[in-house]
Amino acid sequence: MKVINFFLKKIKFLIFKIFQNLNIKIYTKKQRRILKNKINKSKSKSNSIIFFTTHKCASNFSQFMLKEIEANTNYTLFDYGSLLGSLTYELDLKFDFEDYLNKNHSKLFQSKGEIYGPQRKPLKFDGLDDYDKIFFLRDPRDVLISAYYSFGFSHPEPKNSNILDNFNLERDRIQKMSLDEYVLKQLANWVKPMYQEYIQIKEASKGKVLFVSYSEYINASKSFFDKIFNFFNLNNQSLINKLIEKSDPIQQNEDITKHQRSGKEKQWIEKLEYDTLRKINSELYEILLYWGFETIESFK
């Protein structure tokens, strides 16, 4: 059966490539669900799960992991970041996909049998409290530093012109800023509010909740994957071994032109000026305590 499915996927891929070369767009089943604005009710008895994370927290690897989980369970994965990104022309979307998700949640989310993620920003809609949730978070100070180098220098340009102009304008603004200037600005603009919203979502949740950290992902990967697999009631050690083998977050030589620039922890200690570090530690103190990230009392 697995061999048949493998060849069916290969055939579908080849057909897709042929139509792509002929400039004929073929929509996937998941894309058609969005375009039709209609959801088919799941027969599953398993609660749907939202996988919350942030940019610059191995979210690309999370995407790969969730696809593997989908392939080995009865869950259906909806990566709305990628799906909406592929439909920006059709839906006339700009940057903030979360507005679209919140406004159309009744046709995009259902309580049983589905995985949503990696979801890189908070959501806010009626019924959100009822979903099971995984929070995969990195120290926000390292997120800020990684975001500066990524959005300013290495992140691939979007193919869609709806997004490209704003992307390039933002990249130009970032390149004119120092790392410390960027960190202080984006701390207030999105990082602190995002982590606070995640606290509110977690505290309001009625379903099951799991928090796993980026630190555990890079330092205790077996434990990290065990926790996630247990959450999905999935027992597959060979798949865990495969994910561990595929996981390679730490770059030995830093290169700001590469999407995976560093991946290391506690970059904020060596990268930021003392006054910047003192300010962000003070601003983030309660958030760091809540999620269990390191605090330095002398910088509070």
Image: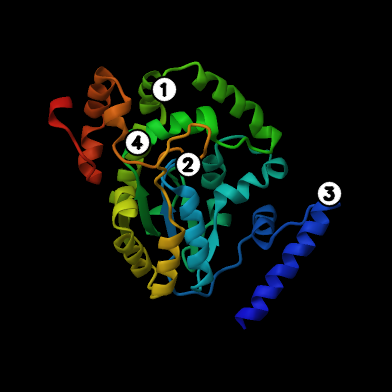
Determine which residue is flagged by label 1.
182
Determine which residue is flagged by label 4.
142
Whether label 3 touches label 4, CB < 8 Å: no
Name the residue at 24% across, 42% down: 293
Which corner quadrant of the image does residue 295 belong to? top left
Label 2 to label 3, Cα distance in Å? 32 Å
Residue 147 spot, x, y in % from top left: 44, 33
Disc tally is 4
Residue 228 spot, x, y in % from top left: 36, 63
Q: Nearer the viewer, residue 103 or 164?
A: 164
Residue 23: mark in rendering: 3
What residue occupies the far bottom of the structure in this picture? 1
Q: Earlier in the sequence, mark 1 or mark 4?
A: 4
What residue occupies the far left of the structure in this picture? 298
Kind of residue at disc 1: Tyr
Q: Earlier in the sequence, mark 3 or mark 4?
A: 3
